[in-house]
Image (cartoon, grey):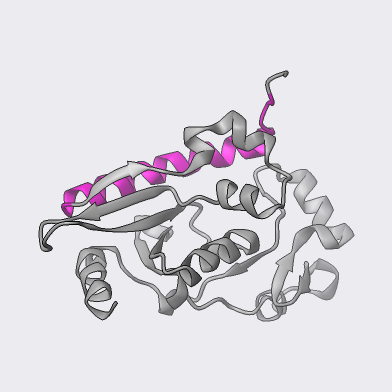
Amino acid sequence: MAKITATPGFEQRIAISEKFEDVVEEGLKASGFSVVPSGTEHTYPDFIEELRLSTDPNSLFLRFEPDFAIHTAKEYDEPPISCCVEAKAGKKLTIEKTAYEQYMKRVSLGQLIAVVFECENNEILWNFVEDIVLIPGEKTVSVFLPERRFAVIDGWICPRETPYGREVLRKNPRMSGTPLRYVNSQSLLPWADFKQRFFEKQSLS
């Protein structure tokens, strides 16, 4: 089989993400966590590129595997308790629809998923995915003139669903174009509080 080559926009987004993931990984290790990469887009990039358009349940779980698996046993008796961590680079505080849905499916199975966001001025914020508040897409696009608004379907902003959106995507290959929503920053927590909140979450489980 011929090797699948990633699209230029996808490669650019991966490069940006990897820099932020390094920062998140260093922060987790400095807090005493054991950390291993788990995001399949980095561990098996060619395989995941082949699944890029696949939407069956198995493929979606593989495509949207969180970036890291972590655990710390220092404050616990064995065995340690683990958590998945997703790093979101880009400084725009957005989350894509399919990724969010996959994370919430994991939560429904009892998994613990934390999402860490790169923000302006090098600030880092985070929360457990079920506690993140998403802004309705209608509110986000309302500040633009009607002819410059992306379509909104079920509360999610869908750039590809309007001629204007498709033109914007054509001119900005780094944009993915998949449905997304913005995150309410008031629902996020300081990165420095991650370890404390992690153990608080365990005590409530």
Residue 8, visible in the rendered structure? yes
Q: Whole-percent x and y of residue 2?
A: 72, 18
Residue 16 highlighted magenta (yes or no): yes
Q: Residue furthest right?
A: 163
> What count of labels does the image hold?
0
Nearer the observer, 110 or 174: 110
In the image, what residue occupies the spot 74% across and 77% down? 154
Q: In the rendered image of this protein, does residue 124 appear above or below residue 5?
A: below
| Quadrant, the N terminus | top right
Against 152, residue 160 (above or below) is above
Query: Which residue shows up at 72% across the image and 46% down it?
Result: 54
Is residue 14 or residue 118 the one in the foreground? 14
Say left or right for 72 vs 24: left
State left or right for residue 69 relative to residue 129. Answer: left
User: Picture coordinates of residue 59 (x, y %)?
Assistant: 64, 47
| Residue 136 place in picture, x, y as percent | 64, 79
Q: Residue at x 80, y 67 (%)?
A: 148
Decide which of 131, 105 is in the foreground and name it.
105
The percent coordinates of residue 190 (x first, y second) are 29, 68
Image quadrant where one finds the C terminus: bottom left
User: Would you say residue 64 sits in the magenta stretch?
Assistant: no
The residue at 64%/60% (across/down) is: 98
Residue range of the region highlighted in magenta in the rendering: 4-32
For this view, does 88 lie left or right of residue 27?
A: right
